[in-house]
Image (cartoon, rainbow, N blue to C red):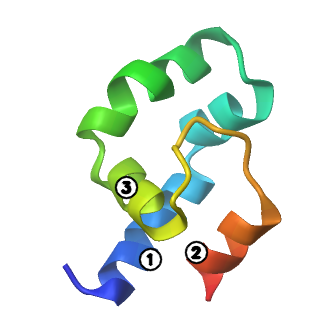
Amino acid sequence: MTEAELKAKAKQCLECPICRSGRKNQRGLAYLFVKFVDRKICPACKAFEEVTGQRAFEPITQEAIDKVLE
């Protein structure tokens, strides 16, 4: 997969309502789903982790956003 494709998929994870809720709240069903299920099967979550070096369920940092949007 090319770098552009990885960044496009990482952007999908950044905008995903489930992932966004899990990262923001750090608790609840969305967080548990992203932490234990989604990041293992979702190609967007895998790409997000590869591009940013940060897990899909961890609180978002400005550095991670910048890496995805470059």
Mark sitting on residue 34: none
Give the spatial CA distance, label 3 vs label 1. 9 Å
Q: Which residue is mark 2?
A: 68
Q: Quadrant of residue 5?
A: bottom left
Q: Which residue is mark 3?
A: 44
Q: Quadrant of residue 18?
A: top right
Residue type at the position of mark 3: Ala
Residue type at the position of mark 1: Lys
- Identify the element where label 3 is drawn: helix
Query: Residue at the front extreme?
Result: 53
Residue 64 position within the rendered picture, expressed as x and y whole percent measured from the top left: 67, 65
Residue type at the position of mark 2: Val
Q: Which residue is mark 1?
A: 7
- Identify the element where label 1 is drawn: helix
Residue 56 position within the rendered picture, expressed as x and y whole percent measured from the top left: 52, 43
* Direction from residue 29 to residue 39 in the image, left or right: left
Residue 34 position within the rendered picture, expressed as x and y whole percent measured from the top left: 48, 28
- Residue 39's place in the image compared with 8, above or below, is above
**Label 2, residues with CA under 10 Å away: few <14, some 14-19, many ≥20:** many
N-terminal-most mark, 3 or 1: 1
Q: Quadrant of residue 24?
A: top right
Give the spatial CA distance, label 3 vs label 2. 12 Å
- Residue 17's place in the image compared with 69, above or below, is above
Location of the N terminus (image quadrant): bottom left
User: Does the CB distance between marks 1 and 2 fall below 8 Å?
Assistant: yes
Give the spatial CA distance, label 1 vs label 2. 6 Å
The residue depicted at 28 percent of the width and 53 percent of the height is 43
The residue depicted at 41 percent of the width and 49 percent of the height is 45
Location of the C terminus (image quadrant): bottom right
- Identify the element where label 2 is drawn: helix
Residue 60 position within the rendered picture, expressed as x and y whole percent measured from the top left: 73, 50
